[in-house]
Every structure is written in C-alpha cells, then in structure tokens.
Image (cartoon, rainbow, N blue to C red):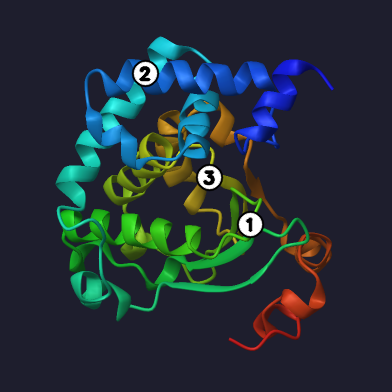
Amino acid sequence: MERGDEQAKQNGHGDGDATEWKKVAELRAVVEAQDPAVKEEDDSALRRFLRARDHSICKASAMLLKYLAWKRAAKPHGTITDEDVRDEIAKDRVHMHGFDRLGRPMAYLYGARHFPARRDLDDFKRYVAYLLDKICTRLPVGQEKFAAVIDLKGWGYANCDIRGYVAALEIMQNYYPDRLGRVLMINVPYMFMAAWKIVYPFIDEKTKKKFVFVANKDLDATLRDAIDESQLLEEYGGKLKP
C-alpha cells in the first residue's frame, strides 16, 4: 500500500484515494478561513462539493461558502422539523420506502398531487430541503446517494410548476451535491415534455444524465431491473407494503 493511501485509511478515509482527500483538506482550510461553520461539515460532505466542481478548489470553495450561508438562513435552528412543513406533508406528494439494488434509499414523487396555485414558494423550498434531509438520514453506512421515481400519471397543466421545479433543482444541485443517484421518470404524459424543455437548461450536465425517461412498455422491466421485488412498492407490482 502506498504511504498516502495508508495515511488516508488511518484518518478514516478508506473509500477514496489519498490525493482526493488531500484536496478535501485544502478545501476545508480555504473555506474555514472565511467561514468557521464549515467545521460542522464532515470530510465526506466536503468531498461531494469538491466532486461537484471537478476537484477545483476555487469553484468548490465558492459553492461550499454559498451552502453554509444558505444553511444558516434555511435552518436557523439546525434542522427543519415535521411541524415546520406540516401543511406540505399533508399534501402526500412524496413517499419514502425501500432501497434499489445498489442500496440507495428510494423516494417516490407523485407529480399529479402537486398544485402550484395552492403552494407558497418559500414553504415549498423549505419542504424540498426537509425531504432531502430526511432521505439522507436513510442512507446506509457507506452509501452517499439516493434514488427516486417520479410518477407523472394524471399530471396536467394544473400541476405544472416551472418555478417550483427549478427551485427544487437548484436546492438539490447547489446544497446537496452528488447525493442524487438516479431518477426514473414514469407514466410521462406528452404534454409534460413542454415543461421539461423549459426546465432542462437549469439542470447541470452531471445531473441531466441521472434522469431516465421510461416508456410505458418498458415500465415493469425497468423497475424490476432497478429494484428487487421485495423492495418495490405493491402499486408497481412489488411486494413492499407502504
């Protein structure tokens, strides 16, 4: 074993190369000089910001500083509680059950249950952060990513929320980098593609590759290929009860 790799393992960095962890240390030093709050973030979190900016210390530090400022404003008490987003939870738009074959926790989002006319954008953004925090608490040891199914069955123009979609993407991309593993878009109506074309430019290149549109004829096979039957919800032909 190389000396650098051995030192990385001794520091609890057994899942990456020594060069990358050295850059993480450099990133921490740069950011800590400007915002001591980075001390609350672990090295794995810093590594995700570093990877999101192709290991550029300059770009990653700017991204991380922006995150720390956002965190203070969005979570003044440290966390977003169920009570903080009670009204959003009641709309029953998101379920979290099971894991995919790669051990990533699954989230199921139901697009036809979202009505922008009934939502406050700030409340919605708080709810998005709450959901991302919640699914991250379900990550098994050694797993840093989650996966999702976005079910658009019944989606129509009354559900279309470009501002909300862009806001959710910005929160995920800017403040939860490298957390998303894959999104399966299912039961997609043709009219949704008009909305997708507007949203698409706001998605960064790495994230674009993670959205997979599934044709109805391939739905069952795709879901079963991605998720074991025991972990797939009953509504999609699996054996997992919600």
Identify the residue under disc 2. 29
Residue named by callout 1: 141
Estimate the x, y position of residue 49 in percent, counting from the top left. Answer: 46, 29
Instruction: Tell me the quarter of the picture where residue 3 sits.
Output: top right
Question: Which residue is at 44% across, 29% downward?
Answer: 201
Horizontally, is 101 left or right of 189 in the view? right
Instruction: Assign the N terminus to one quadrant of the image.
Output: top right
Give the mark nearest the N terminus, 2 or 3.
Answer: 2
Looking at numbered disc 1 in the image, what kind of residue is underneath it? Val
| 33, above or below 188, in the image | above
Structural distance between the alpha carbons of marks 1 and 3? 14 Å
Residue at 26% x, 53% y: name it: 125
Crowding at label 1, few (<14), some or many (≥20) Cα neighbours within 10 Å?
few
Task: Name which residue type carries label 3.
Answer: Arg
Q: Residue furthest bottom?
A: 241
Q: Are marks 2 and 3 in contact (CB under 8 Å)?
A: no
Q: What element carries label 2?
A: helix
The earlier-in-sequence mark between 1 and 2 is: 2
Q: What residue is disc 3 on?
A: 179
Q: At 28% across and 26% down in the image, what residue appears? A: 65
Specify whether 219 is left or right of 202: right
Q: Nearer the viewer, residue 50 or 184?
A: 50
**Going by the image, does 97 lie left or right of 15?**
left
For marks 2 and 3, give the CA distance.
23 Å
Q: Where residue 187 sits: x, y (%)?
A: 61, 64
